[in-house]
Amino acid sequence: MDYNLPPKPPSEFAELVDGVEDIITPEVEKEEAFFAQVSCTVCGGPVSKVLHPVTPFKTGAILPNFVGKCQECGATSDPHTGLVLSHSVI
């Protein structure tokens, strides 16, 4: 198999997905809205979305498995359960 093929123009990829239902965008929007309202389980500070360090993908899930990392205290927690995955006390 020849892996040195020239890149295809974006229009060719657009033709491949034309008419296919977009199931990813609504899930991304739902997740963004969810994380916008999540706060740190430890200190209540704002969190950033980060890839789960142990389970980055769940079976059957469309999107990667994200957890929240606090922008203030650095705690990492599962925003769906509130379980603190890591936290360093300074």
Image (spheres, rainbow, N blue to C red):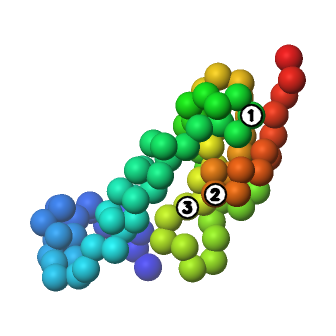
In the rendered structure, which amino acid carries the disc numbered 2?
Answer: His
Q: How far apart are marks 1 and 3 (CA)?
A: 24 Å
- Is disc 2 placed on a helix, strand or loop? loop
Q: Residue 3 carries which label?
A: none
Identify the residue at the far top of this view: 90
Kindly identify which residue carries mark 1: 42
Task: Compare marks 1 and 3 and give the one earlier in the sequence.
Answer: 1
**In the image, is residue 8 above or below residue 66?**
below
Of residues 49 and 45, the one nearer the viewer is 45
Q: How far apart are marks 2 and 1 (CA)?
A: 14 Å
- At horizontal 33% and vertical 65% (from top left) the residue drawn is 26
- At horizontal 64% and vertical 22% (from top left) the residue drawn is 72
Q: Position of residue 48 (x, y in %)?
A: 55, 37
In the rendered structure, which amino acid carries the disc numbered 3?
Answer: Pro
Of residues 36 and 88, the one nearer the viewer is 36
Kindly identify which residue carries mark 3: 64
Left or right of 71, for residue 19: left
Q: Position of residue 15 (x, y in %)?
A: 15, 76
**Could you say which quadrant of the image residue 5 lies in?**
bottom left
Which is in the foreground here, disc 1 or disc 3? 1
Label tally: 3
Q: Position of residue 65 (x, y in %)?
A: 60, 60
Kindly identify which residue carries mark 2: 80
